[in-house]
Image (spheres, rainbow, N blue to C red):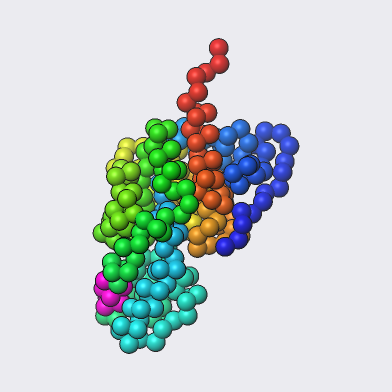
């Protein structure tokens, strides 16, 4: 994937530039974003799952292709499958089959995919974590932040993947596409997380690797961190105007933690 897209440097307050962690955002620890959304203390971090915490895109493509073969359906190109990652399964299957979501082949494709996902992907979940994820999540929790997941996966699949990866206990809420009426990029997934945890949007940050995540965050009034190591390129992500952009999970922590620390520092006397 593309490296983090460098922003133009500007003098004065709110300078835009990159720091040592490869984070594009604002100076002063990043407490105020470039997108005009939120400037209060960070209390909640909501993560996407595939392509953000877990390096599953290749495994997802392989599982889709195996499911097509099992159903004796003509296989799509791998790039076409990859382009559907981040969409709910029914929408992805309908898109790849060139049909509507009520087509019986879609339901059968989803069933076959879920079976193969459990067999093929879950056993290797711990090895699929992106570098720094486990340590980074621990650091955010140690800083007093609440963590949650909002994903386009079905909730049962998300729960199973997080459990297999050894991460489930770190998250206060896990919201899947089947728990909302309107999945990403609609704001409902984020709004459900906020409502369940009783945290205002201005105190929350969404971390994701697709424009679906970033557009959801903006519509819900949340700040966002775009990660460029997942599905969408840095150029695509920039079009959704994230608050920060990071090229690694360490960069995500570098964007969020200083803002949290700055917001909790005692006032000068």
Q: Residue at x 26, y 71 (%)?
A: 115
Q: Residue at x 44, y 48 (%)?
A: 133
Q: Measured along the vertical axis of the image, is residue 79 above or below residue 184?
A: below
Q: Measured along the vertical axis of the image, is residue 83 above or below residue 248?
A: below
Which quadrant of the figure contains the C terminus? top right
* Horizontal and vertical percent position of residue 48: 41, 54
Q: Is residue 47 visible?
A: yes
Q: Determine whether, in the image, residue 244 is placed left or right of residue 190.
A: right
Q: Is residue 114 visible?
A: no
Q: Is residue 214 magenta?
A: no
* Horizontal and vertical percent position of residue 138: 40, 40
* Horizontal and vertical percent position of residue 66: 35, 78
Span shown in magenta: 107-115
Q: Residue at x 31, y 63 (%)?
A: 123
Q: Determine whether, in the image, residue 196 is placed left or right of residue 59.
A: left
Q: Looking at the rendering, which quadrant does residue 155 occupy?
A: bottom left
Q: Is residue 110 magenta?
A: yes
């Amino acid at each position: 994937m593309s490296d983090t897209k460098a922003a133009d440097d500007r003098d004065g307050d709110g300078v835009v530039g990159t720091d040592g962690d490869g984070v594009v955002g604002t100076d002063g620890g990043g407490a105020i974003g470039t997108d005009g959304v939120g400037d209060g203390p960070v209390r909640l971090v909501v993560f996407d799952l595939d392509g953000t915490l877990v390096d599953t895109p290749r495994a997802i493509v392989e599982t889709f292709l195996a499911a097509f073969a099992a159903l004796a359906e003509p296989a799509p190109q791998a790039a076409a499958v990859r382009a559907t990652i981040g969409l709910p399964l029914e929408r992805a299957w309908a898109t790849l089959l060139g049909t509507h979501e009520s087509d019986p082949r879609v339901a059968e494709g989803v069933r076959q995919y879920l079976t193969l996902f459990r067999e093929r992907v879950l056993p290797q979940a711990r090895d699929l974590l992106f570098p720094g994820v486990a340590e980074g999540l621990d650091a955010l929790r140690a800083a007093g932040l609440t963590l949650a997941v909002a994903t386009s996966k079905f909730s049962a699949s998300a729960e199973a993947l997080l459990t297999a990866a050894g991460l489930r206990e770190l998250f206060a809420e896990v919201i899947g596409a089947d728990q909302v009426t309107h999945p990403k990029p609609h704001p409902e997934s984020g709004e459900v997380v906020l409502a369940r945890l009783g945290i205002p949007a201005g105190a929350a940050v969404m971390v994701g690797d697709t424009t679906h995540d970033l557009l959801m965050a903006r519509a819900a009034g949340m700040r966002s961190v775009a990660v460029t190591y997942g599905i969408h390129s840095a150029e695509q992500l920039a079009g959704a105007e994230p608050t920060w952009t990071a090229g690694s999970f360490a960069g995500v922590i570098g964007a969020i933690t200083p803002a949290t620390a700055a917001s909790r520092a005692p006032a000068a006397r």
